[in-house]
Amino acid sequence: MEGSPIHVVSADGALRRALVARLERAPELHEHTEGAAGFEGIGPGDVVVSTPADCPPERAHELVRAGAAVIILAPIPRPEERARYERAGAAAYIPMLIDGVDLVRAIARSLERARQPSRCRTA
């Protein structure tokens, strides 16, 4: 999982710190996790963890188009909202749970996909 930054983006400082702390406890993620209040500095291959309040589907779509994997943590999962994020290209839309196991798994899958060579190359 080398070299792929994981950006935890939330305007809520307490939530951001809690999520970063949780991810840092995952041995495979701890060196790559950082918290931010905004979306500056996110590039291709990066992973973004955010919430619907901080990253609406339109922003998620922009990030995906720029090559980032977007994972949305939903405090209250809603089927319509999930569908909007899926259409936007989000890598995952998962319930915000205290243990964070699903979040760690979603990040690991996104990082694995980012390391795989692209099948579509332009000359």
Image (cartoon, rainbow, N blue to C red):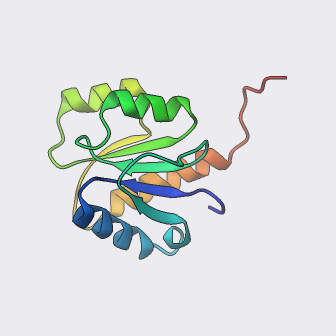
Closest to the observer, 6 or 84: 6
Residue at the (79%, 23%) spot, across then down? 122
Q: Is residue 107 above or below residue 114?
A: below
Give the position of the N terminus as an image quadrant.
bottom right
Give the position of the C terminus as an image quadrant.
top right
Closest to the observer, 23 or 37: 37
Residue at the (39%, 45%) spot, across then down? 71
Closest to the observer, 90 or 58: 58
Residue at the (58%, 36%) spot, across then down? 67
Q: Is residue 67 above or below residue 28?
A: above
Residue 80 lies in quadrant: top left
Where is residue 45? Give x, y as percent: 60, 46
Where is residue 12? Give x, y as percent: 23, 57
Residue at the (38%, 32%) spot, across then down? 59
Figure label count: 0
Q: Is residue 102 above or below residue 69?
A: below
Residue 39 lies in quadrant: top left
Residue occupying the far right of the picture: 123
Where is residue 110? Give x, y as percent: 52, 48
121 sits left or right of 15 in the view? right
